[in-house]
Amino acid sequence: MSSESVQCRLLRSLCIFFLLLIGATDAAITVYQANNQAAFTTAPGAKYTGVAAYNPTSLSPPPVPSPTMLTTIPITLQNSGTPNLSIKQKGSFIGFSIEMSVTNQVLGKNSTLIQVPFLNLMANIQQRAGSVMIRVGGNTQESAKLVDDGVIPDGRVLTKNLTGVTGTTQTPPLEFSRDLLYMMRNISSFVNVHWFLGIPWFVTQPFDTKIITASQEILGDYLLGLQAGNEPDMYHIHGHRNDSYSPFDYGGEFSDLLTQVAANGADPSGKAMSILVGPNIADFSWTPEQVWDSGFVDKFGPNLAYLAVEKYPRDNCAAMFGGPNAVVTDPQTVLPLYLTHDAHTGLLAPYLNSTMYAQTVNKPFLMFETNTASCGGFLGISDSFVAALWGLDYALQMAHSNFSGAMFHLGGQNVFYNPFTSPPTNQSTFHQWTVGGLYYSALVMAEAIGPSNQTQVLNIGVPGLTSYTPIYGIYENGTPVRVAVFNYVDDPSGANDVHAVISISGATTPSSVKVKYLAATTVVQKGGYTWAGQTFGKNFESDGRPMGDEDIKTVNCDTTAQTCTVDVPAPGFALVFLTDDAFTENKGAPTMTFPTTAHTKTHNTATVDPSVLSTSNGFRMSGNELAGTSKPPSAAPRSAQASLIAVGVVIGAVVAMLGRVL
Ligand SMILES: *[C@@H]1O[C@H](CO)[C@@H](O)[C@H](O)[C@H]1NC(C)=O
Ligand SMILES: *[C@@H]1O[C@H](CO)[C@@H](O)[C@H](O)[C@H]1NC(C)=O
Ligand SMILES: *[C@@H]1O[C@H](CO)[C@@H](O)[C@H](O)[C@H]1NC(C)=O
Ligand SMILES: *[C@@H]1O[C@H](CO)[C@@H](O)[C@H](O)[C@H]1NC(C)=O
Ligand SMILES: *[C@@H]1O[C@H](CO)[C@@H](O)[C@H](O)[C@H]1NC(C)=O
Ligand SMILES: *[C@@H]1O[C@H](CO)[C@@H](O)[C@H](O)[C@H]1NC(C)=O
Ligand SMILES: *[C@@H]1O[C@H](CO)[C@@H](O)[C@H](O)[C@H]1NC(C)=O
């Protein structure tokens, strides 16, 4: 009996489903769903007609730098007294911003059907950082309406009202139920996720304050903050305010909110009105200074828990949404702009005055929403290894620049830039999740900073250093503990590999250091990147747990020269652990337990054993794997998993078989 027919016997109904699909499609190229959306391509080079999130098209790597760059880089650290270190940072520095309208794809269907791959992805970060920040919002928060229980049918938590679609991003008005908030609260009892939400701000007379009351009541201490308006400096572009709308007017609305909430009792404990987040400007038509100078923080200091901005380096709106004068940006042309450290220093320079100001008023300053490009990102950039390197350098540069955190935005199936993407609902029984480069950035950042809350970051200048090889020192209590070294260049010849020659004045040179690499063969690679040898695979291959054996390199130091030389391939990134403590520091972190069961599929509802959720600590020397329950890559059997995962793997095999047949 062939293995195909064994699988078909195991999953008879699924095979029938597949045969129907094949019958109904242009079998040579793409498998289509009933809704006529391409699910995945099967023939290399075939024209892709499916959704953006799985588009396999890649770009060409940019040429190597000419003239040559500095490749042997002396990195001289001081054991104490290093000036200009950043403020103290948290391991949860990078969080995620989930467009409200896709929470039902990403978080779960409702409070009783939570996506286990999502929990695993968050657990990986929690193990390194202690907690995870997630903002639920975006353009869709502005017209979101909390409706009574039972209004939305079929146990769903949200629905889109397609009769009122407006704006550049064509975001439909949303209706959501309290169960969305219960789902978020239930997630926080599995993994230590803390949340941001937003108050709808398009209509201020009166404000719809329902979310204020409900989010406080349901999320309690898991509610970090409530956004007061999303990109108010862009409201006039889409006709939500007139052209004269100014920071002063925004402040007036903020004041109206406080008055209305006091009058209608929407914040009985008074806490919600002390955790507001503003001004959340896109730096489009107002500068942050214009907002500070309008007296915003002076007036509303007690109400503000965070100051925040939102910024994308550029946009891909013309390609995504067209328009009469739309000039579409060619991704190949802008690719080199994502492979240089200057991109980040340029983007962040306008905020340095504000992060200093934020320190004087004692408020953390967040990059509330960001990604490679607004309106979905760029094909070949946002969904390749480019994004992983870009996102990690960006994260470290923001930490260096005294931001206190940043959230990478994710949308639905129709964008390129998702840190992670759930399969289309129709395919969730036979496809797993797709993990993008920015998730790796977040994971590595969590590990680079760690859980101590004492970590400081410094972008290190070296004479002659080019913008292709940024270097960061990472300090605990003023002492260097880790070093981050990037190589943005794509050169398989080895001629542009970096040799980072690290020395620490005022300390004994260790006999060896440990190194973890973030790696891919080329910057334009799509999926299958590795962090210390482990991967989340390619499209549709991840259940949220890292696959493969962890591979940590030991580099011997030259105790005579008092240097440790770490090589970083072109392209690549290395995190160098200078001491064993830097490697094991979160050993004391409590082991996570998941006291109850979670379900994810709408079809084939399966009970998931809590042990499916990984339970080890990322830094640990003992049990070196990233995740204790991590299993070999999909080539090896992963049979003894919870039923849900087992179903996914067997079904994956059926898909692979069909791929060969087609
Ligand atoms: C960050 O803040 C620290 C402490 O105020 C300061 O010394 C440092 O220069 C700041 N860094 C930047 C890039 O502004
Ligand atoms: C969640 O959805 C499932 C499946 O549709 C349904 O059985 C369940 O009652 C829903 N849960 C809630 C809290 O609505
Ligand atoms: C959908 O939106 C339209 C326009 O805003 C509104 O008139 C209608 O009542 C909404 N429908 C529902 C079911 O809420
Ligand atoms: C999730 O939320 C529901 C409310 O719909 C609650 O009844 C249930 O106990 C929660 N489950 C967990 C695991 O917390
Ligand atoms: C920095 O910000 C403060 C507060 O808004 C402002 O008064 C000052 O002019 C700004 N400095 C620069 C150089 O922009
Ligand atoms: C796929 O989704 C579409 C639209 O969401 C739905 O109409 C269709 O019935 C689904 N097909 C399957 C096989 O579930
Ligand atoms: C770090 O800060 C968080 C709160 O922001 C706290 O829960 C955690 O216990 C702190 N960790 C350490 C090691 O102090």
Image: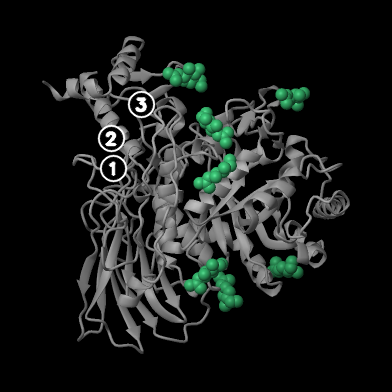
* Disc 1 residue type (three-letter): Gln
Say if 296 sits above or below 482 in the image: above
* Disc 3 residue type (three-letter): Phe
Q: Is residue 206 visible?
A: yes
Instruction: Find residue 627 and report its image quarter.
Output: bottom left
* Disc 2 residue type (three-letter): Val
Q: Is mark 3 within 8 Å of ligand 6?
A: no
Instruction: Find residue 183 and report its image quarter.
Output: top right
User: Helix, strand, or loop for circle 2?
Assistant: helix
* Circle 3 residue: 40
Q: Is residue 317 visible?
A: no
**CA gap, disc 3 and disc 1:** 26 Å
User: Helix, strand, or loop for circle 1?
Assistant: loop
Percent x, y for residue 491? 26, 52
Instruction: Find residue 355 and report its image quarter.
Output: bottom right
- Disc on res. 125: none
Q: Earlier in the sequence, mark 2 or mark 3?
A: 3
Tags 3 and 1 touching, CB below 8 Å: no
Tags 2 and 1 touching, CB below 8 Å: yes
Foreground mark, 2 or 1, reads: 1
Q: Would residue 251 appear left or right of 343 to someone viewing this image?
A: right
Percent x, y for residue 521? 26, 48
Say if 145 sits above or below 124 in the image: above
Q: Which residue sits at x=30%, y=44%?
A: 528
Figure colour scheme: one colour
* Circle 2 residue: 649
Percent x, y for residue 9? 22, 20
**CA gap, disc 2 and disc 3:** 17 Å
User: Helix, strand, or loop for circle 3?
Assistant: strand
Q: Which residue sits at x=27%, y=84%?
A: 509
- Disc on res. 641: 1
Q: Is mark 2 within 8 Å of ligand 6?
A: no
